[in-house]
Amino acid sequence: MRRVLIVDDNHHELAALREALEPYRAEWDVSYSLSSEAAMASLRNSEIDAVLVDARMPDVDGHAILEEVQRHFEGVIRILLADAPDEAEMLRGVESAHQVLHKPWDASKIVSTVERVCRIQEKVESPAVRDIITGIGRLPSAPKTYLALTRAMQDPDVSFVELARIVQQDAAIAAKLLQLVNSAYFGLARPTAKLNEALSYIGLRPLRSLVLSFESTSGFAGSDARLAERFQRNGLRVGSAAMTVMAGTGLEHDAFTAGLMHDIGRLALATRRPDQWQRVVEEATYNDKSMAQAEFLTLGVTHAELGAALLGLWGLPYDVIEAVAYHHRPAEVDPTRLTLAGALHIADNIVWQVSGQAGESQVGHAGLDHGYLESSGLADRIPDWQTQIAQRISDAA
């Protein structure tokens, strides 16, 4: 049974939520608090799986409550209940909440969201994942420039000049962003050497994703420039491809982030556990296994779960974490529709196919999940996506 705490100082809203959640009494044990003090007391005195907090209460800051929960009750799932989609609210929620739900809420949406986050939390905190992370040794810390940008972008009036000042503190990242924005990926009519101009071309959310990719890659690859370049090139291709698959859904930016970071677990294994990684490669090469199968047989965990755990440690949105965790098994998220995990699965496989046709080295890829494509009604769209993605990769070459 899930033990859930809901915090809201509005008696009418609490009553409405209580009534809406009544049908779930057999699966959910729900308690309610009207203040932050009462909520903290409940968390201290009871075992709570998830806490849901209204973002904007007259006398209490919902974000502040979640930040306190984050500091003192690490294993508790944190859900922010917000009035309406708002960029600043979402960015602040990245640091304080696992998920943000927008009004109007319905009971089924609340229940499915909490269950989904609990499921992915259990997956990335499994003993096998913990053993691998413990054995990796020193992990790169949460990327500093990424966090600084996230905080700055909570101000809706922040300028690209101010963001450029943050990025300029890391000369290597600034150089990479300028290099990228002047490449064929952006197709500018004229090159630019001005960082604030480059950032305006990239856009706010893609900027944060790119900075995260650059910082985390550097943290693992260190001075191995070839390994870093290979990881970033593949991440850009898959991120761009995932945006193509999710076009028109409103989730394009999350798809780009998930694509950039989908193999961070593989990079961690290759750089921090090279002997075990070599055994994985040999298992895939000589025994005709996919890399994910070889990882599980050799390590008891795949790069997908490990990568999701790392992104969770760094505080990324749960939609992105879920996509990374399930990008080889998208049907486990939802077999009936296109999800972020499904888009990442499709993008990863199409990029792999295109790269293989271009003669790049490929080992042990599992291939498309045709059962998922049929059950979700996406099979007929694959040829069109293949054409678009192949063209984008060719244009950027």
Image (cartoon, rainbow, N blue to C red):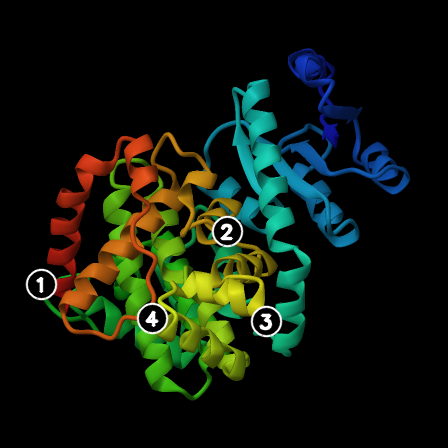
Between the C-alphas of marks 3 and 4, the distance is 19 Å
> Looking at the image, which residue sits at the far right?
45
Between the C-alphas of marks 4 and 2, the distance is 18 Å
Badge 4 is on which residue? 232
Point out the image quarter for the C terminus: bottom left
Label whose residue precedes the other's in the sequence (3 or 2): 3
Between the C-alphas of marks 4 and 1, the distance is 24 Å
Between the C-alphas of marks 2 and 1, the distance is 36 Å
Count residues near mark 3 (Cα–Cα under 10 Å), then give few for <14, some for 14-19, many for 20+.
few
Instruction: Return the mark for residue 321.
Output: 2
Count residues near mark 4 (Cα–Cα under 10 Å), then give few for <14, some for 14-19, many for 20+.
many
Label whose residue precedes the other's in the sequence (3 or 4): 3
Between the C-alphas of marks 1 and 3, the distance is 38 Å
Badge 3 is on which residue? 141
Q: Could you tell me the amino acid type at mark 3?
A: Ser
Badge 1 is on which residue? 189
> Looking at the image, which residue sits at the far front?
287
Residue 287, how many percent across, how many down? 39, 70
Taking the spot 56% from the left edge, 40% from the top edge, the residue there is 99
Verify CB contact (< 8 Å) between mark 3 and mark 2.
no
Between the C-alphas of marks 3 and 2, the distance is 17 Å
In the image, 70 versus 50, the foreground residue is 50
